[in-house]
Image (spheres, rainbow, N blue to C red):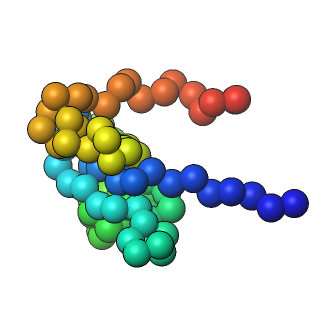
Amino acid sequence: MSSTLVVPDFWMLFDPEGKADGSTRAVVQGEIRHATAESAHEMFTPNKRAREREKRQGWRVIGVERADWNDYWTGVKKPGPEPKEAPGA
């Protein structure tokens, strides 16, 4: 049985107020560079302690599609609230 991995067009780093602070493509020239939000967060913030601090402060990495990227980057759209529990839990 095979599995399909679906990644967004971009991963974006948002501060606690929902303002975009960074962006990276998930796939570059057909190669998956960042399959998960965690791997993208490692690229934005290489230091593990700093990443953990950001998470505690409310920073988040969200997957965004190309059609919505500009709206998130300019602040027209804000990321939704963080889910209280994982889907299907």
Residue 17 visible within the image: no
- Asked if residue 70 is positioned above or below residue 40 in the image, the reply reads above
* Left or right position of 56 against 6: left
Give the x, y percent position of residue 79: 31, 31
Q: Residue furthest right?
A: 1
Residue 84 visible within the image: yes
Residue located at (51% from left, 24% from top)? 84
Residue located at (38% from left, 45% from top)? 65
Give the x, y percent position of residue 71: 20, 35
Q: Quadrant of the C terminus?
A: top right
Q: Residue furthest left?
A: 74
Please identify the quarter of the rendering in which residue 51 is found: bottom left
Please identify the quarter of the rendering in which residue 57 is found: top left
Question: Between residues 21 and 57, which one lies in front from this camera angle?
Answer: 21
Question: Between residues 11 and 68, which one lies in front from this camera angle?
Answer: 68
Residue located at (41% from left, 62% from top)? 26
Question: Between residues 32 and 55, which one lies in front from this camera angle?
Answer: 32
Give the x, y percent position of residue 2: 80, 61
- Asked if residue 51 is positioned above or below residue 46 in the image, the reply reads above
Q: Quadrant of the N terminus?
A: bottom right
* Left or right position of 74 against 79: left
* Left or right position of 22 against 37: left
Question: Between residues 55 and 4, which one lies in front from this camera angle?
Answer: 4
Residue located at (57% from left, 28% from top)? 85
Give the x, y percent position of residue 78: 25, 29
- Asked if residue 46 is positioned above or below residue 10 in the image, the reply reads below
